[in-house]
Image (tube, grey):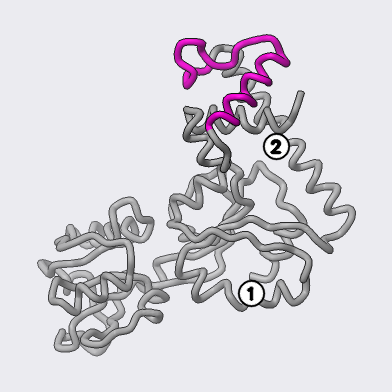
Amino acid sequence: MDIRKLEIFCEVYRQKGFSQAARKLGLTQSAVSQQIKGLESEIGVLLFDADDRSHPTAAGEYLSVEGGRIIAEISDLVKGVQAAGGIASGQIRFGMIDVAAIWIMPKVLKNFQNEHKNIRLDAVVRATGELVDLVMAHQIEFAVVVSDGLPDALEIRKIYADSIVAIVPKKFDDKGGVISVKDLKGEPLILYPPASHSRTIIDEAFRRNGMVPTVSMEMHYPAAICSLVDQGMGIGLISELSAKESRLEGQKIVKIEELIEARGIGVVWDKRRRLSPQARALISML
């Protein structure tokens, strides 16, 4: 059986469609269809329903489980061979959230490249939830993410304790630089979207104080939140690392007692997979 065809089949199964899998794999839909037809011809059974090609047959369901296991074992075999041969060359595909890409990883990556000039680094910058999905789908080896409230299937190594801070107008009474979430009662707040891990941390801090945040607007980008504060739209709550990178003109940064070092940042990977020696070497530098 052609392993590449098996990999394409598993991606079609995961994406629940040929066109979605084609986009994920960087192939044309026609090429994906041809590979699946070739695999079906090779093993002599239909893997997807003849009338609805997005729906797997019983044989397809079986192959998705066993085929995925075989692909993982082959990947582990390759990594083991690479480990035996050292890490002189190769590639690491990993992910990181935006603040990690700006504040945590640049010096680490520079030092790593100085020591391992023939290892290619292939990184994606996404939100925590998206990166976790990529790790679990084995699209990337590891990710640097907000490390709180993640699935048990992930190995988590915390590397930084970040805070959630308030971005307020300069005239705001900051009580000496540290306020409580109680001081934000009734204030219009500009927050991360509900799906964000940081938003979960914020909502939980309010809940513990018997409060619900008064949401003026939801926005993912910290720089945009700061701009909205400048326009009088409300008070922004963002990561302290993000606040350091933002250009604050008519605002100031105020610490929130309940949210000091409340946002863990860590490196995560799938417990079921063996990291490549290249990835382990990079993680060891964090």
Q: Nearer the viewer, residue 23 or 208?
A: 23
Provide the secondary structure element on which disc 1 rests.
helix
Instruction: Report the side of 157 relative to 232 (left or right).
Output: right
Residue drawn at x 24%, y 71% is 236
x, y percent for residue 90: 77, 57
Circles 1 and 2: CB distance less than 8 Å?
no
- Residue beneath disc 1: 108
Which amino acid, by three-letter code, is at mark 1? Val
Magenta run includes residue 55: yes
- Residue beneath disc 2: 72
User: In the figure, 164 relative to 177: above or below?
Assistant: above
- Near mark 2 (Cα within 10 A), the count class, few <14, some 14-19 or many ≥20, is some
Quadrant of the image occupied by residue 220: bottom left
Magenta run includes residue 257: no
Q: Residue furthest right?
A: 85
Q: Nearer the viewer, residue 110 or 165?
A: 110
- Near mark 1 (Cα within 10 A), the count class, few <14, some 14-19 or many ≥20, is some
Provide the secondary structure element on which disc 2 rests.
helix
Point out which mark residue 258 bears. none
User: In the figure, 40 relative to 140: above or below?
Assistant: above
Instruction: Report the side of 161 relative to 172 (left or right).
Output: right
Quadrant of the image occupied by residue 203: bottom left
Locate the C terminus and report the quarter of the image it occupies. Answer: bottom right
In the image, the segment drawn in magenta is 29-56
